[in-house]
Image: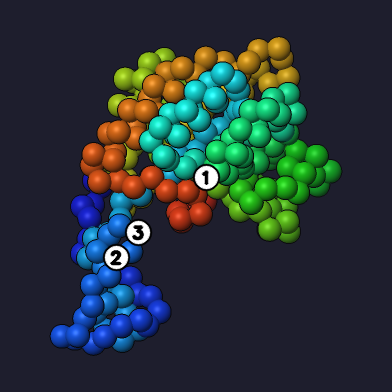
Amino acid sequence: MLRRAGPICFWGEGRGGVGAEANWIEARGKIIVICGIAKVCCLHAMKKLSLTFDDGPSPPCTEAILAVLSYHSVPATFFMIGERMLAHEATVKRVEQAGHVIGNHTRTHRNLCGATFEDLDREINRWGQYFRPPGGHYDEGVLKYLRDHDIQLAMWDAEGLDWKLKTADEIVAYLDAQISSLEGDSAIVLLHDGDSEDVGSEHIGGNRWATVEATDRIITRYRAQGFEFVPLREMTLPRGPKVWR
Ligand SMILES: [Zn+2]
């Protein structure tokens, strides 16, 4: 079950008094207390969610998701497919201009397990701060390539299964069950603004209107439960439970 907020402690650099001289300060909207020399005690563990969207860009659904995120002032990371980026440059630009992070999701959405260096270089192309392997499949070769090019593997903690489920109700319920069963108070959430099945075709990336509606409801629902929506850089990146082959 999800653990309730604090009182957990973490330790920061020294900025404060000792014992009775403890000072209260504001940090990211949360009250923390300086409770000793060089020690900062957080009274309320922050519950954090970071939204990520894979397989786009895919207008008009990507654009609609941007509108939802803007309305709620929520940051997100879009793991885009290279061929889609080339086909929808205007949407890529709008995602960037909105301040969201664009992650690497390969050029053609192929499984990279067993790929040669040349294949990896073509698919990942040495760019991006974050990389998410299609289908979550990776092996030691992928990890080495990422290490060598200073790119972070960015898996996820919970997903909406929106590539399969048809309605916002189903997506929210599926995600809710996952988040409720997580250990800890934070989760990187995987949703999809595009459909990997039609990469390279004339299609616009599949129907993701249920995801658009689900995104709006997820933000409203979890904010009401005290979660903060944060960019990926504020999360501890999960590596996934194992190396798939
Ligand atoms: Zn994908």
For discs 1 and 3, the disc positioned in front in the rendered view: 3
Residue farthest toward the right in the current orientation of the protein: 118
Q: Residue at x 68, y 21 (%)?
A: 199
Query: In the structure shown, which secondary structural element does the residue marked by tag 3 occupy?
Result: loop
Camera-side residue: 33 or 110? 33
Looking at the image, tell me whether mark 1 or mark 3 is earlier in sequence order: 3
Under mark 3, the amino acid is: Arg
Query: Image quadrant of residue 169?
Result: top left
Q: Which residue is mark 1?
A: 155
Q: Give the percent coordinates (x, y) of residue 163.
A: 49, 22
C-beta proximity under 8 Å, tags 2 and 3: yes
Q: Residue at x 38, y 45 (%)?
A: 229
Q: Residue at x 46, y 55 (%)?
A: 234
The crowding category of the residue bearing disc 2, from other C-alpha atoms within 10 Å (few below 14, some 14 to 19, many at least 20), is: few
- Residue 188 visible, this orientation: no
The crowding category of the residue bearing disc 3, from other C-alpha atoms within 10 Å (few below 14, some 14 to 19, many at least 20), is: few
The crowding category of the residue bearing disc 1, from other C-alpha atoms within 10 Å (few below 14, some 14 to 19, many at least 20), is: many
Q: CA distance from mark 2 to mark 3?
A: 7 Å
Q: Is residue 123 left or right of residue 175?
A: right
Q: Is residue 72 left or right of residue 125?
A: left
Query: In the structure shown, which secondary structural element does the residue marked by tag 2 occupy?
Result: strand
Q: Which residue is mark 3?
A: 28
Q: Give the percent coordinates (x, y) of residue 60.
A: 56, 18
Q: Which residue is mark 2?
A: 26
